[in-house]
């Protein structure tokens, strides 16, 4: 009978390399989805605050939908319906069916879901900026992207950091939901190992420990960033 260290080790019969590869895929999906969510969240927050009425309504509807529907259901809908729609589009153009990359689809799907939550974080952070600061910047001739880069972004970042750090930790856990569509991330690999060896407790606890380590390291890094950002804010 194999010992626990043989099962999760790096020997000929160990699942250590596969678990580390799954962990790497989890990180790749999480980072990619986080960046996609940042871009979508910023765009949606900007539309809600200062965009045309039609864009504001669309952004609020997108946020409400993603926050109301369970994330697992959204992932299934976006993955299967999105893949079907894309293949039908390519067939309409005269091309054959396209096999989508599982990791890229996972990044886009999770990014769309996380973008809805990020938009609310950014909206609150932007609205917390004293309006006089924005008016003063405009009086100096700043507008558009220059105003956002020089004034809005530096002032909103400290207020948004805690919420974004929490979103990142949730995203690491939510990446496990992608296992339902067959992406070889950490949980999917642990399920394969558990099913192959019948040592369910060993591999599920190993996966839980790896998620825990990721969360602890993420919290430490977020705390470091928050301390750095707070140094730029004058004491009141």
Image: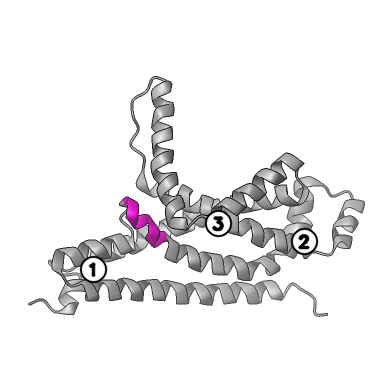
Mark closer to the observer (2, 1) = 2
Is residue 235 rendered to the left or right of residue 108?
right
Residue drawn at x 57%, y 54% is: 115
> How far apart are labels 2 and 3 at the CA level?
24 Å
Q: Is residue 11 visible?
A: yes
Q: Which mark is residue 16?
A: 1
Q: Closest to the observer: 44 or 74?
A: 74
The magenta stretch spans which residues? Answer: 175-181
Residue drawn at x 34%, y 76% is: 209
Most frequent secondary structure within the magenta stretch:
helix
Residue annotated with mark 2: 127
Earlier sequence position, callout 2 versus callout 3: 3
> How far apart are labels 2 and 1 at the CA level?
47 Å
Residue annotated with mark 3: 68
Is residue 12 rendered to the left or right of residue 120?
left
Residue drawn at x 62%, y 71% is: 162
Mark closer to the observer (2, 3) = 3
Give the tally of numbered discs.
Answer: 3
């Amino acid at each position: 009978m194999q010992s626990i260290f043989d099962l999760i080790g790096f020997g000929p019969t160990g699942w250590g390399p596969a678990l580390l590869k799954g962990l790497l895929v989890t990180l790749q999906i999480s980072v990619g989805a986080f960046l996609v969510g940042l871009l979508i969240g910023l765009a949606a927050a900007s539309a809600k605050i200062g965009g045309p009425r039609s864009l504001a309504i669309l952004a609020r509807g997108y946020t409400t939908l993603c926050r109301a529907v369970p994330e697992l259901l959204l992932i299934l809908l976006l993955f299967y319906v999105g893949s079907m729609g894309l293949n039908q589009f390519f067939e309409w153009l005269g091309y054959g069916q396209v096999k989508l990359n599982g990791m890229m689809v996972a990044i886009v799907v999770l990014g769309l879901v996380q973008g809805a939550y990020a938009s609310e974080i950014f909206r609150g952070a932007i609205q917390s900026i004293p309006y006089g600061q924005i008016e003063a910047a405009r009086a100096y001739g700043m507008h558009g992207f220059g105003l956002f880069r020089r004034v809005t972004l530096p002032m909103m970042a400290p207020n948004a950091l805690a919420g974004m750090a929490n979103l990142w930790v949730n995203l690491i856990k939510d990446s496990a939901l992608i296992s339902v569509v067959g992406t070889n991330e950490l949980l999917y690999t642990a399920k394969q190992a558990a099913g192959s060896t019948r040592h369910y407790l060993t591999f599920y606890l190993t996966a839980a420990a790896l998620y825990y380590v990721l969360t602890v390291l993420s919290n430490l890094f977020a705390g470091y960033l928050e301390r750095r950002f707070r140094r730029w804010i004058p004491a009141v």
